[in-house]
Amino acid sequence: MKDIKELRQAMHEIDPIHVARWSPRAFSNQEVPESVLYSVFEAARWAPSAANIQPWHFIYARTEADRDTFLQFINPNNARWCKEAPVLVAVMSKIDAERFGGYNIAHAFDTGTAWGFLALEAARKGLVTHAMGGFDREQAKQLLDIPENYELHAIVAVGYHGETASLPEDLREREIPSGRKAIDEFTSEGRF
Ligand SMILES: Cc1cc2nc3c(=O)[nH]c(=O)nc-3n(C[C@H](O)[C@H](O)[C@H](O)COP(=O)(O)O)c2cc1C
């Protein structure tokens, strides 16, 4: 694998953790200590949210039985690599809020922020994270007893980076950090 620094270059000065974080598929079988896992959730805890509602909820699976349950609703294409991850986390948010007279328009926005904070803290702790949208939401809601007023956004594999050689052959060539659009492709001054 190429050096991560060759593949990702920041255009402006930032904390290097933003560029160092990426989403590999190879996980080692090293356990994540509980204190480290809780540090990762602690980072999510401090994310800003509309009216400080903190609409996010994370269900984590560490035991074999819990991970097996997750693997039932994760698409086979994702399951084939994330089955090695020691922790799988379902990221969801509470859709409603009394404070807003019913619907919380910011529930997904805020939960995205929380997952972003989680991913960066995980990277800072030497972990890797890989979010997945490829899973059966209805089946997941049923198997995990998720209430109707929660929306499930992603499953995140969390663990320590493993050897590329441990992956199925077709996934090995994809085990490379990706690049990004230039800033002027997603910003505009004054109006769109
Ligand atoms: C909401 C969301 C859904 C994703 N779904 C999948 C997925 O189902 N399978 C997969 O291999 N990667 C998935 N990814 C990972 C993205 O492809 C990856 O984050 C993106 O290509 C940027 O690469 P990087 O995270 O390595 O910087 C998902 C990421 C996010 C945030």
Image: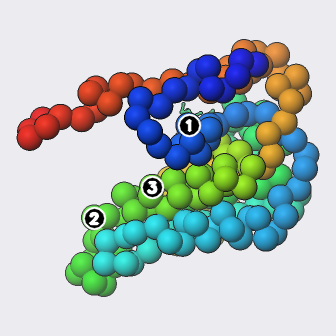
Residue 175 horizontal side relative to residue 21, left or right: right
Mark 1 residue type: Val
Secondary structure beneath dot 1 equals helix
Q: What residue is disc 1 on?
A: 19
**Distance from the alpha carbon under mark 2 to that under mark 3:** 13 Å
Q: In the visual, does 22 lie left or right of 83?
A: left
186, above or below 159, in the image: above
* Residue at image coords 83%, 52%: 86
* Cα gap from disc 1 to disc 3, whole angstroms: 18 Å
Residue that carries the numbered disc 3 in the rendered image: 112
Q: Residue at x 62, y 57 (%)?
A: 121
Where's residue 61, x and y in %? 76, 61
Does the beta carbon at disc 1 come under 8 Å from ligand 1? Answer: no
Where on the image, by quarter, is ligand 1?
Answer: top right
For residue 130, above or below residue 183: below
Quadrant into which the N terminus falls: top right
User: For the residue labelled by badge 2, is the local secondary structure a helix, a strand or a loop?
Assistant: loop
The residue to which callout 2 is attached is 105
| Percent position of residue 91, x then y | 56, 59
From the viewer's perspective, is the residue at label 2 or at label 3 nearer?
A: 3
- Residue 17's x, y, as percent? 59, 45
Estimate the x, y position of residue 56 in percent, counting from the top left. 49, 68
Name the residue: 69% across, 68% down.
Answer: 39
Label 1 or label 3, whichever comes before in sequence order = 1
Please tell me which residue lies in front, 87 or 116: 116
